[in-house]
Amino acid sequence: MVQLLVFVRFDYNEEVIEEFFFCKRLESNTTVELIFKVIDEYVLKAGIPWSKCISLCEDGAKAMSGKLTGLAAEMKGVASECKSTHCVIHREALAAKGMPESLNSVLTDAHRCCESY
């Protein structure tokens, strides 16, 4: 079972608000088309114009990250200004791969400090 969690960040009265948007259980064999369809249906149901979507942050899974065939490409088709970035949590994991132990311990300590805030 796979859970699709969608959060939104928006400007409201000159303040940036971040909120949970929706969660939907998906079949274990998720495809770009299925993921986009679920998001599209929810966005349309909420009455939000796709032109308001300017950014997508994804986890780098195969169905999400392809520039020509991934979710970012699908969203760019309906929201031409939409940019895609890779989740910062996963960036940390990628950075730690192959890192010398002396540097990895510094990264681990810094991560622990951040978690306490």
Image (cartoon, rainbow, N blue to C red):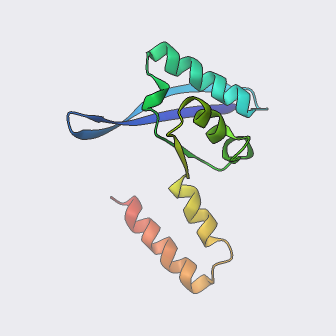
Position of residue 116 relative to residue 98, above or below, is above
38 displayed left or right of 46: right
Of 72 and 91, the residue lying toward us: 72
41 displayed left or right of 50: right
Q: Where does the C terminus fall, quadrant-wise?
A: bottom left
The residue drawn where x is 61% and y is 83% is 101
Q: Which x, y percent locates residue 68? A: 72, 44
The residue drawn where x is 58% and y is 22% is 40
The residue drawn where x is 60% and y is 70% is 95
51 displayed left or right of 102: left
Q: Which x, y percent locates residue 37? A: 65, 23
Q: Which x, y percent locates residue 36? A: 64, 28
Of 110 and 71, the residue lying toward us: 71
Which residue appears farthest toward the left when viewing the image?
13
Which residue appears farthest toward the right when viewing the image?
29
Q: Where does the N terminus fall, quadrant-wise?
A: top right
Of 106 and 37, the residue lying toward us: 37
Of 65 and 69, the residue lying toward us: 69
Position of residue 81 relative to residue 95, above or below, is above
Q: Quadrant of residue 33?
A: top right
The residue drawn where x is 62% and y is 23% is 38
Q: Which x, y percent locates residue 67? A: 68, 47
Q: Quadrant of residue 47?
A: top left
